[in-house]
Image: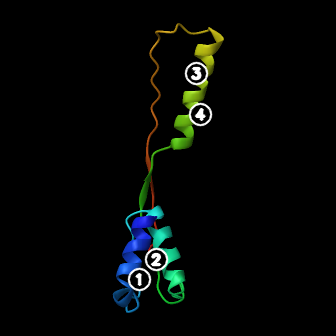
Amino acid sequence: MSDGARAAAEAEAVVRGLDALVCVSDPVAFGAIMSLHRMSISVPGDIAIPRITTLDVGAERIGTEAGRIVERLRSGTEPDDRRFSVRVEPTLAPGDPT
């Protein structure tokens, strides 16, 4: 977030002439939006920040499966030295088409 805020603030003169600002990640975009608001630049009224396409790595499923494995190990139903494998396929989370 601090990178986005710093970049927007340092480029204030340039930013005021843009129609859109593309950020490399959601945290950078959030920082940029906060900085733009401090400059009284409205998002999306004065400048747009489109969503980028990102990769959903399935963090929620990974956490759920890890919890299940830990519970099985803690309950004693699995040997302590057993190896586990869970396959979680990442999916694209497309951004705005505009």
**Residues marked 1 and 3 touching at CB (< 8 Å):** no
Mark nearer the N terminus (3 vs 2): 2
Query: Where 23 falls versus 9 (above or below)?
Result: above
Task: List the residue tagged with mark 2.
Answer: 49
Quadrant of the frame with the C terminus: bottom left
Q: Identify which amino acid the numbered label 3 is placed on.
A: Val
Task: List the residue tagged with mark 4.
Answer: 64
Q: CA distance from mark 4 to mark 1?
A: 38 Å
The residue carrying pointer 3 sits among few (fewer than 14), some (14 to 19) or many (20 or more) residues within 10 Å by Cα, namely few
**Residues marked 1 and 2 touching at CB (< 8 Å):** yes
Query: Where 83 falls versus 25 (above or below)?
Result: above
Task: List the residue tagged with mark 1.
Answer: 20
Mark nearer the N terminus (4 vs 3): 4
Q: Identify which amino acid the numbered label 1 is placed on.
A: Ala
Q: Residue at x 46, y 66 (%)?
A: 95
* Residue at far right of view: 75
Q: Identify which amino acid the numbered label 2 is placed on.
A: Ile
Q: CA distance from mark 3 to mark 2?
A: 41 Å
Task: List the residue tagged with mark 3.
Answer: 70
